Image (spheres, grey):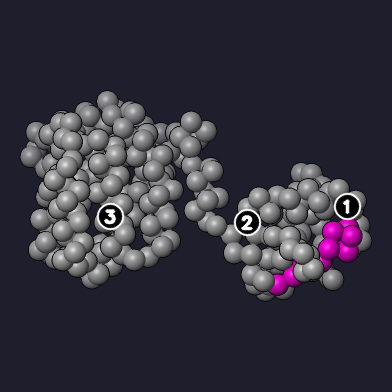
Amino acid sequence: MESLKINTETTTLVDLVEESLLKYIKEKNLKPGDRLLHEEELSEQLGVGRNVVREALSRLRSLGILDSRKRRGIVLQEPDIRKNLEKLINPQMLGRDTIIDLLELRYTLELGIIPTLLNRITDKDIKDLESILAKEVVLGEVRVSMEDELEFHSRMYAITGNQIIMDLQQMLIPMYRYIHDNYDEFDVFNKKIKKEKLQASHKDILQALRNRNKNEYEEVIRRHLMAYQLYIEEYRKMSS
């Protein structure tokens, strides 16, 4: 088992074993359903106590990478990416730089899905968005409640039919809440956008989707998210 070696540059023995196991899984090209060695065998191969191996395995189980099954022992499984990241994306636990990066990820994601979105949208999708729009509670010029914002954009993401894209959007829900809870910080940019008559509502987005026009839709979605973009640019300018 030559691939199972410990990297002595890491902090704790459990960290070393965890890294060694992940490296071994990768180098051996193991797939979900493949079996790993038992605790005793791993302990012997790595030259560490079983309690250290058990803790490292427990970490990998918590990430959904490993599963223990009767008669088969420790088996690899496909981790739930969304579930793992949802545990980490909490604005209260994140620094401002990370929050800004996540806001930028949302902005980039909205633009990145445009080709897939317009290629796959159907008349039923349009009707669903119309139904969501009809019951929106407008709180300002273009502002709606966090729940309405989330429902409208979630339905747009669903049109792509890409589960990873939909999962990414769901993982970014705390960012919707962050924007809602810190709306005053964005409002200065909203006022500027309104003054320049660049604001774009969900109604504008829906009309662009009805037209199936890529350039029109991209221009509308950029205006809809312009406050976020200006907020991000201002923060990065102040931080540089």
Look at the numbered disc 1 and give the secondary structure of its residue: helix
Between residues 19 and 85, which one lies in front from this camera angle? 85
Which residue occupies the foreground of this view, 235 or 216?
Answer: 216
Quarter of the image for residue 189 reads: top left
Crowding around mark 2 (Cα neighbors within 10 Å: few <14, some 14 to 19, many 20+) is some
Q: Is residue 163 above or below residue 232?
A: below
Residue 182 image position (x, y, % from top left): 33, 28
Quarter of the image with the C terminus is top left
Label of residue 155 in the image: 3
Tell me the CA gap for discs 3 and 2: 28 Å
Tag 3: amino acid: Arg
Residue 235 place in picture, x, y as percent: 35, 34
Task: Give the residues in magenta.
Answer: 34-43
Q: Eyeballing the image, is 204 above or below 100?
A: below
Query: In the rendered image, which residue does mark 2 sit on?
Result: 64
| Image vertical order of residue 131 relative to residue 194, above or below | below
Front residue of this view, candidates 193 and 140: 140
Label 3 neighbourhood size at 10 Å, few (<14), some (14-19), many (20+)?
Answer: some
Among the 4 quarters of the image, the one containing residue 116: bottom left
